[in-house]
Image (tube, helix red, strand yellow):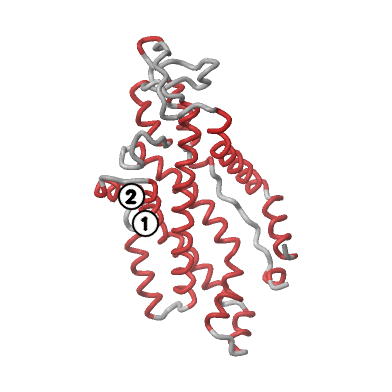
Amino acid sequence: MSRAGRAFASKVWRHPGSRTGLILLGTVVAFACLGPWLIGADPNLSDFSLNRGPLGGPPGPSSTHLLGSDALFRDVLARLAAGARMSLAIALGATVLATAIGSVVGVLSGYFAGRWPDRLVTGFVDVALAFPFLLLITAIGVALAQTDAVTVALVLGLTGWPGVARIVRAKTCTVTASNFVHCARALGVNHRRMVLRHIVPGLRGTLLVLASQMAASMLLAEAVLGYLTVGVPPPQASWGRMLHEAEHFIGVAPWLVAPPAVVSRRRLLRPINVPTVPAAARRR
């Protein structure tokens, strides 16, 4: 790793908010990756040897099922781990797609600020941002009817990039107005080298913050789609669908609602606040 890269990683880790976000993210990813192997239970297998809980509700927590079982006698902890893998995979795919599209569009729009490509892009972004995001993806999910994980990720990614594009455009305009960019233009640097060598490195911290914020938003959006039954179809587990399936038993079996509600909160994946690395350090 270069000196600038080490300085950047050190600044990220020393920042309290960034460190907390990385620890929480690492915990969730570890649970998603290792949970199914450590738990050992099949998330889609019903254990009909269990007795129903009080008031006819699902079986409660026990030594065999630490978080109890759902209405179909499936292990809640196993489904929570399986749902973590599904929800995080969808959120990651959608985040990568939205950040990539938004970054390219935002950089090109900011680099040609004031010209017709910029006016065209900003007009489209303004119209796209006028629609409430959750309402938009819900309407698309209902229109598609039959969905799978890839479809959900594509829907979220292809509708989530306008906000990224607007912020990246503003940051690109700021970097483009810097003295070292003016000097590079005076030396005759072509557009491709100007963007890749001088402008994109100045957006690194902004893109990292946007990606972490976008991941949290996509995680919440996937949970909303699952809760409204327009996300990943059953029997595949997802945090939103687990909430939908447990809402009928909130009075007699609150342990079914609490785990997916806690892990799908938007604050779980906190945005990473990255201190800005000076341009001189980035060019070393």
Q: Position of residue 207 (x, y in %)?
A: 55, 61
Nearest to the observer: residue 128 or residue 64: 64
Picture disc at residue 195: none
Q: Is residue 75 above or below residue 271?
A: above
For image coordinates 50% across by 22% down, the residue present is 67
Image side of residue 201 versus residue 242, left or right: right
Q: Quadrant of the C terminus?
A: bottom right
Label whose residue precedes the other's in the sequence (1 or 2): 2
Nearest to the observer: residue 16 or residue 144: 144
Q: Amino acid at mark 2?
A: Ile
- Measured in 3D between alpha carbons, the distance from the residue under mark 1 to the one under mark 2, in whole angstroms, is 7 Å
Pointer 1: what residue?
159
Q: Is residue 129 above or below residue 111?
A: above
Q: Is residue 115 above or below residue 18?
A: below
Nearest to the observer: residue 157 or residue 62: 62
Q: Are marks 1 and 2 in contact (CB under 8 Å)?
A: yes
Q: Position of residue 209 (x, y in %)?
A: 56, 56
For image coordinates 57% across by 73% down, the residue present is 199
Instruction: Report which quarter residue 142 is drawn in.
Output: top left
Q: Position of residue 88 (x, y in %)?
A: 49, 44
Pointer 2: what residue?
137
Dot 1 falls on a residue whose secondary structure is: helix
Image side of residue 117 versus residue 22, left or right: left
- CA neighbours of label 2 inside 10 A, class few (<14), some (14 to 19), many (20+): many
Q: Quadrant of the N terminus?
A: bottom right
Q: Amino acid at mark 1?
A: Thr
